[in-house]
Amino acid sequence: MKKLNQYFDHTILKPEATEEDVIKLCQEAKEYGFYAVCVNSCYVPLAKKELEGSDVKIASVIGFPLGACSSDVKAYETDWACNEGADEIDMVIHVGALKEKRYEYVRDDINIVVAIADEHDAIVKVILETCLLTDDEIVKACELAGEAGAAFVKTSTGFSKSGATAHHVSLMKKTVGDSMEVKASGGIRDLKTTMEMIEAGADRIGASASVQIMKESQ
């Protein structure tokens, strides 16, 4: 098992976040050796500047938090974020299209983002918003993300009814096996929950409480 700090995408996505908050996030990520920071796309250039010379990756959310913008908008935001320095793209699926069984649309919506990310050597994590889905819909979303070429499936935005659960992480890992990785995010605020997610199969943890969790582990 890798070191605990290397599981974390240290995250700040709240609408009231300031540049000062993002700078602090980047400083903490360097101090604790987190795998990545996860920010809204407008803060990618700032994160790039603050993380220069470090090994910390930059993840940018796309179509966040609803996923209901057009595929062209997601494509443009992905291209812009990658040009500004994003290494990873955390995109939200079109939940309504999935529920309507418009699977071709969902797959294409992911694939257009993957295609642009690929041009920049960036990887894509697909946010499913599991709290809004049935188990069967979660399985189908994982399959579609795999067909579209994504590297990860991710549980949640943290902005809906609830966040990650060990059950959903386990279901996602069982579905994707070794073909993709799983990121648990949303409501992970302590060491106990973090370890539950890792034991359920999470390869990455998205959290704004990463520093507190690391302190608790020490």
Image (tube, rainbow, N blue to C red):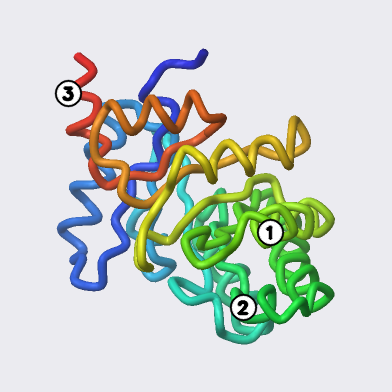
Residue underneath mark 2: 76
Q: Quadrant of residue 29?
A: top left
Instruction: Please tell me whether mark 2 sits on a helix, a strand or a loop.
Output: helix
Label 2, residues with CA under 10 Å away: few <14, some 14-19, many ≥20: some
Give the answer, above or below, for where 218 lies relative to 161: above
Question: Residue at coordinates 28% horizontally, 44% vertically from top-left?
Answer: 26
Dots 1, 3 in contact, CB < 8 A: no
Residue underneath mark 3: 215
Query: In the image, 153: left or right of 107?
Result: left
Give the answer, above or below, for where 218 lies relative to 198: above
Dots 3, 2 in contact, CB < 8 A: no
The disc, 2 or 1, on the residue closer to the chain's N-terminal end is: 2
Q: Report the Cα–Cα distance between label 1 and label 3.
A: 34 Å
Residue underneath mark 1: 117
Dots 2, 1 in contact, CB < 8 A: no
Question: Residue at coordinates 34% horizontally, 26% vertically from top-left?
Answer: 33
Label 1, residues with CA under 10 Å away: few <14, some 14-19, many ≥20: many
Q: Quadrant of residue 175?
A: top right
- Residue 14 x/y as whole percent: 26, 65
Give the answer, above or below, for where 202 lies relative to 58: above
The disc, 3 or 2, on the residue closer to the chain's N-terminal end is: 2
Query: In the image, 191: left or right of 43?
Result: left
The disc, 1 or 3, on the residue closer to the chain's N-terminal end is: 1
Query: In the image, 104: left or right of 79?
Result: right
- Residue 58 x/y as whole percent: 46, 48
- The amino acid pointed to by label 1 is Ala
Query: In the image, 115: left or right of 122?
Result: right
Q: Quadrant of residue 136?
A: bottom right
